[in-house]
Image: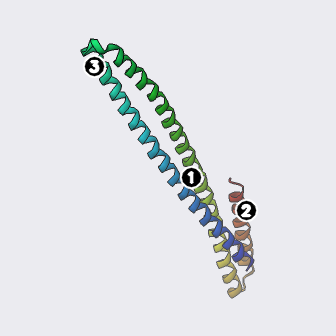
């Protein structure tokens, strides 16, 4: 009963970390999409800047106007680039968080599995009245608890 209770707690923690990993991956995808949108906006400003540079060469009478436009586009592009890079960094952070949660989830799943084996060993030991199976059950239970502690410590 004790092993089953600990196993249920470990199973809950495994499910929680898996859910967190999914949420973090979703956040990473959202930030990646926002960064992509910013890079597309950056590219549009680059195209307008290039058109202004071409127009300046083709219409020397409006050279001052187009020089101002080019300067404005360069300034806007710098702001857009900074925003895109910030969003990419946020996306990377969420990806790293997801990876950490998935690692922890695997540890919880390993601990739960070993405890389930220990429960099965306990049942077999009770039915067969073999003392050595009881020791196997204690060993598996101890290993399951150790792996659970590793999961709790994020190792």
Residue 13 image offset from top left, x and y in percent: 65, 65
Going 42% across and 20% down the picture, which residue do you hit?
A: 71
Between the residue at mark 1 and the residue at mark 2, the CA separation in whole angstroms equals: 23 Å
Q: Please name the residue shown 27% across and 14% down the image.
A: 57
Q: Earlier in the sequence, mark 1 or mark 2?
A: 1
* Mark carried by residue 98: 1
Q: Earlier in the sequence, mark 3 or mark 1?
A: 3
Estimate the x, y position of residue 60 in percent, counting from the top left.
Answer: 27, 12
- Is residue 41 shown left or right of residue 113? left
Q: Closer to the camera, 47 or 21?
A: 47
Determine the residue located farthest toward the left in the rendered image: 58
The image's mark for residue 55 is 3
Crowd rating for badge 2 (residues with CA inside 10 Å; few <14, some 14–19, many 20+) = few
Q: Residue at x 42, y 36 (%)?
A: 39
Whether residues under marks 1 and 2 lie with C-beta atoms below 8 angstroms apart, the answer is no
Q: Quadrant of residue 120?
A: bottom right
- Give the crowd class for mark 1: few <14, some 14-19, many >=20 residues within 10 Å: many
Residue extending furthest bottom? Answer: 127
Check disc 2 and report its element: helix, strand or loop: helix
State which mark lies toward you, 3 or 1. Answer: 3
| Residue in the foreground of this view, choosing between 32 and 131 | 32
Quarter of the figure with residue 124: bottom right
Q: Which residue is mark 2?
A: 146
Which residue is found at the position 58% from the left and 56% from the top? 102
Q: Nearer the viewer, mark 1 or mark 2?
A: 1
User: Residues under labels 3 and 1: Cα distance?
Assistant: 48 Å
């Amino acid at each position: 009963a004790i092993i089953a209770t600990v196993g249920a707690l470990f199973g809950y923690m495994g499910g929680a970390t898996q859910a967190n990993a999914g949420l973090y991956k979703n956040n990473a995808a959202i930030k990646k999409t926002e960064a992509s949108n910013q890079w597309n906006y950056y590219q549009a400003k680059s195209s307008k800047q290039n058109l202004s540079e071409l127009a300046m060469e083709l219409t020397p009478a409006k050279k001052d106007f187009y020089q101002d436009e080019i300067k404005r586009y360069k300034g806007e592009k710098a702001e857009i680039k900074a925003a895109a890079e910030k969003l990419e960094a946020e996306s990377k952070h969420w990806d790293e968080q997801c990876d950490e949660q998935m690692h922890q989830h695997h540890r919880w799943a390993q601990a739960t599995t070993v405890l389930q084996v220990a429960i099965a060993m306990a049942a077999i030991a009770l039915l067969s009245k073999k003392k050595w199976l009881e020791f196997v059950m204690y060993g598996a239970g101890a290993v399951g608890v150790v792996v659970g502690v590793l999961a709790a410590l994020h190792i």
